[in-house]
Amino acid sequence: MRRFSALIGFALFAAVMLIAVPLALAGQGYWLTVLTTAALLAFGSLGVWLTFSIGRINIAQGAFALIGGYVVAILGTRYHVSFWLSLPLAVLIAAAVARLVGWPILRLRGVYFAMITLSLTEVASLAFLNGGSFTAGASGITSIPRPALLSSSLSIYLASALLLLIGIALAWRFAASPTGAVFRSLRQGEELAASLGIDVARYRLLAFVVSSGMGGAAGAMFAAFQQNIFPTSYTVNDSVNFMLYCFLGGLQSVAGPVVGAFLLVIAFQLLSVIQRFQALLYGIFMIAAMLFLPNGLMSLPQVLAARRHERDAVVPPR
Amino acid sequence: MSLLEIEGVSRRFGGLLAVNDVSFAVETGEILSVIGPNGAGKSTLFKLIAGFLKPSAGRILLDGKRIDGLRPHTIAARGLVRTFQETTVFREMTALENVVVAHHLRRRGSILAELLATPGVQNEQENFVANAKEILAHLGLSGFEDESARNLPHGHLRALGIAMTLAVRPRVILLDEPFAGMNSEETARAVQIVRGIRASGITVVLVEHDMGAVMRISDRIIVLNFGTLIASGSPAAIQQDETVIDAYLGRADETAAL
Amino acid sequence: MKRAAAVKRRHVLAAAGGLAAVAAGLGRPAIAAMKTFRVGVLGVMSGPDAAWGLHNKFCAIATANMYNAVGGFEIGGEKYGIEVSAMDDQLDPKIAVAGAEKLTQEDGLRYVIGPNVDTTALSIKPVMERNKAIYIPYAFNKTLYTPPAENAILGMIASYEAGPIIYEYLIKTRGIKTIAFLAANEPDPLNQQQAGVAAAEKLGLDVLVKDATYQASATDFFPVVSPIVKKKPDLLVLSGVAPATAPLLIKAARELGYKGLLSTETAQDIKILTEGAGKYAEGFISVGGASTPEIRSAYMESFVKEYAKAAGQWDDEAGTKVYALEMVLHTIAKAGPQAIDDTSVYKAAIDSFTMPNPFLKSASTLQYVGQAYFGQKRQIGVPMVVNEVKDGSFQTLFVGSVA
Amino acid sequence: MAQILIDGSVLSASYALIALGITLIFSIMRLLNFAHGELFMIGAFMVYYVYGAWHLPFVLGLLIAALVPALIGACFEKFLFRRVMRVATREENSMLLAVGTAILLDNVALFLFGEEQHGVPETISGVLQIAGGFLPYQRLVVVVMSLALIALLLGFVQFSRPGRAMRALAQDRDAALLMGVDVDRTSMLGFAIGAGLAGLAGGLLVTIQGVNAGIGVDISIKAFIMIMIGGAGVVSGALLGALVLGFAESIGYSALPGSETYLLIFVALVLFLIIRPQGIMGHPWG
């Protein structure tokens, strides 16, 4: 039953993203751009959400977005490789890097993992900054060719929306599959999981690699859509934001990061008056959420229901 | 050849020799208890056998094949599974989910098949669920399947922990203080459960403080003191053993003096 | 890491005042009745670098208010009210693209002032070129202004243009023979460093240090500066140095015993310099706003007042940015009303355009320049004022110009 | 060579205050204080206003630079962290809360202080020359005061009653509770002292580096690096981390131009953590 209603929700969301939005906003490049941004950020956040599910706070997604972006940029500008080939390559390379660094760093937990992933974002940015002529250093890579078939705002939007839908389906299937249950078990007790025969190192690496591959895809799409990439295109702040979208939307459900990314990106575009307060509001919002809604925005209905229940109940339950 | 052989195993932490040249063997189908005063090295020994620690010296063999140095999940796959001293379960899952996850080693589907939810994978999951329900019922946990583990009473949590180990279908099970903190009624039930496990063909090794339960349940007992094996034998023989009595009494004196 | 480059204090109230000013301009019935010309401002208006974009915004608002107060600006015999739409890009390329799309497509604007740095300017380049919208970045990347790109007009003197002029002046007046360069490892400063080295070599200077860099977020410059001052150059150029960093570098160099000259090609803030470097700031040479008090016309004085009304206070660093909207308006007036919606008409008028510079006391002309660097005239020919710190304030050393 | 030694010592001494503060909070609360750099920045601004803008004595500025962040820290502990840590179901919660406080302080500072770079006059001018190296007296003052403060703190933790309570709490929370340590009060005190140390470091360094509202993140990252090197929650580790980072910077910057230094520091850090995830002095974790 729950699965059925989730399917309906997904179908509705897909219909809105792929049919209603294009019909309503076809000529409006600006809103399409905003939604493209939201969709790609949400996609990247879904990866971070997967690492949250194994109990790791991942502040490295900016690094992998940077890697994905540079793969597309270097292949596209120097070797004239089609975007449609370099996109999967970007995913593979980001995933390969994640596999390499993930093995040692995933032994760390809690704040240590958070600190080391935060450092990774810095490493990536500095590495591209000091990459010499290969990465073009601080001046970044500009004039990345637009991908074939993606010359208009609408087509870029559709591609991003499609990517997001694939991402949601992927994360959702992961969460619902036995592998997802293994992920959740790791979060609650790695030793216990190991004693039950679960190869802990392998599964947490799997989550991190999938997550980073998604970060790479998001960065690749962004690079193609903005047609440029710089070492500072993704900083620690971006990595933290990827994490915040998950957290503010809610870590319990796949919809969390999507809700978080769309809500925050769109709300701050709509309320341009408060744009200057955006970061301040993030801060206040986070603290308030931590105090009153520790399970994210998606838990608001439950919390409200619980409140109402408490208020209406003449005799307190049990 | 014994099922499980511990040969001259030592483990050093800095200057402390927590386990010192311990050797013993476990035969198929027996219940063997490891006892000893606090800090005697029992828990360390368990961790060494289950692969959570690597021995500084010595060999551990399961079916005549070395398992020392292997990682815990590989040892579990070979058929040796431990429980934990604390009532460790996955607290944010339901009882049923806990036991279903424990079927991990029997999963056959690839990740791709799982993501696509192929009929094979679905079938397999249904089997796991059915089997998990059976195990839960067997351990007296029917009716708690959909209860979040975090809400289960203490005694049920330990049963759930054992249920999860059984789902792995081990040949040897290491129980770390299965009777700790139980009243006599609960202990009696737990003793029945452990006997049931043995009856189903699983060899049991347990660490325990509750002497009454140990004497009732064990086929054989080994005694550790300061990391060294000081005695082994039948419950009756151990109860008469001078060194064992000294070890326990010595400690008791120290405790009283404090 | 967050850019440590902080520029100029921004007042919250002042910003709110600016918004109110825009709203007031819209509400005036006289303006509602006439045609309006809308111009966009896209730049960083929040966060540590907010001053850069806010300068653009308040300069545009000040110019708009001045014309609106006298009944509008005349294009093709008709008066136009002027309306400013400002968008904050937060220095984030992603947001800059969305802002450019909004200004050009949703609002249908064909003229946009900004953005402030290479990353944001290069990000919106495809959008602007596609929509054939003129934009006036304050970023120095040459690809923005060189063909096939044709819609960007550099709003100020590029530092690579200022460098040679300053070095030549110092060779003549102070007899410098050796030079060293130090830059932050960021796009703008690095480009400026390279251009500076090339210019210095062309002038026959002995370049002792070519590629010394420091991390943009560094705070202690002793380790960075000491190897350079050991070589004792006559002139140490702090290429593209951020106002926040300049005093720290100057102080470090002097404390390490450096006796030569120090200069930069970017605009600095005298208060930050003297507060951060104290007496060591004396003699530091930098490029000033294009409207220092000594050379201001009466029109500039009234502009300064109008700016202060909108922003809360005048800011000398905004002096380089007073020209953009003025040039756009007068070029359109010259090209004819079609230019409002068709920028090709505007671009055709660029080559021959000149107007008297209203901001300077002395008679001078404003025109488009940049042929030498970009192969086409895609730069506003603002006067280049070079300052030296004397007794804790800027003094004009000389006024130059670029071709 | 002399210059490298001088620079390394100056950096290490001031970094040590930062590292000690964050490690103190960590050891007592098991909490990574993401807002540490922001507290440093606030301390720096306090000295800027009191000493730089209002021309009151520098020492008074330092005092306020310690007190204001300490008060902020105490309030954070009492009203935010204590509450969240008590009810938190996931260990992420307290860390995310810490990220929230960092973002909040960053932006409040931006509003209150503006984004402009500020500096203060030297408290003492002149440059000392030793063995061909330059050491401005101001930097000497910073080193001496840092060392004095470090000694004071170590003495306090070692010998005072509240200091002993903190150590007990750091060792074992439950045992400390049994021993009659007032956990709530000690936690609040520990957070306040840690935050005060960050503020003091900022207040001292503003005389050398100046301050602007954006420096918080960079300082926090440096603090993280130091406790990762030395091991989190261990005093000796914090001091060692500061020494390693200070000299890595001074050697790196004079040997390598620009940002390669930090790239190398980060890469070395990751490699080092692979070999020794608990840092040099830390106990194993993770």
Image (tube, coloured by chain):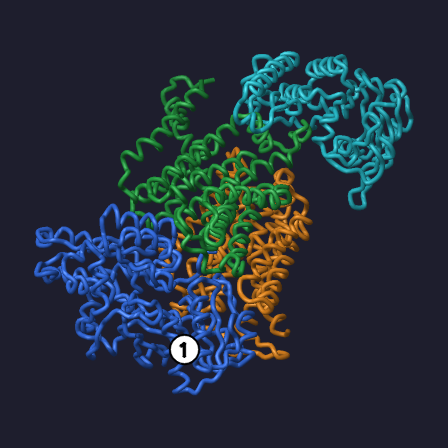
Q: In the rendered image, which quarter is residue B131 located in?
A: top right
- Of the chain colours in the picture, the one used for chain A is green
Describe residue C350's horizontal placement relative to residue B5 as left or right.
Answer: left
Describe residue A83's horizontal placement relative to residue A103 as left or right.
Answer: left
Residue at image point 38% right, 61% down: C143
Residue at image point 31% right, 34% down: A21
Where in the figure is residue A232, as x and y percent of width and height? 46, 55
Look at the picture and state if D116 lies above or below A255. Answer: below
Residue at image point 61% right, 79% down: D132
- Of the chain colours in the picture, the one used for chain D is orange
Describe residue D272's horizontal placement relative to residue C170 as left or right.
Answer: right
Q: Nearer the viewer, residue C202 or C177?
A: C202
Label 1 marks a residue whose chain is C
Where in the figure is residue B236, as x and y percent of width and height? 88, 18
Answer yes or no: is residue D155 visible.
no
Where in the figure is residue D61, as x and y percent of width and height? 45, 64
Where in the figure is residue D29, as x and y percent of width and height? 56, 44
- Of the chain colours in the picture, the one used for chain C is blue
**Chain letter, cyan:** B
Q: Residues within 10 Å of mark 1 (few under 14, many from 20)?
A: some
Look at the picture and state if B21 lies above or below B175. Answer: below
Answer yes or no: is residue C388 visible.
yes
The kind of residue tagged 1 is Phe
Q: Quickly name the residue at label 1.
A: C284
Q: Quadrant of the N terminus of chain A?
A: top left
Q: In the rendered image, which quarter is residue B80 located in?
A: top right
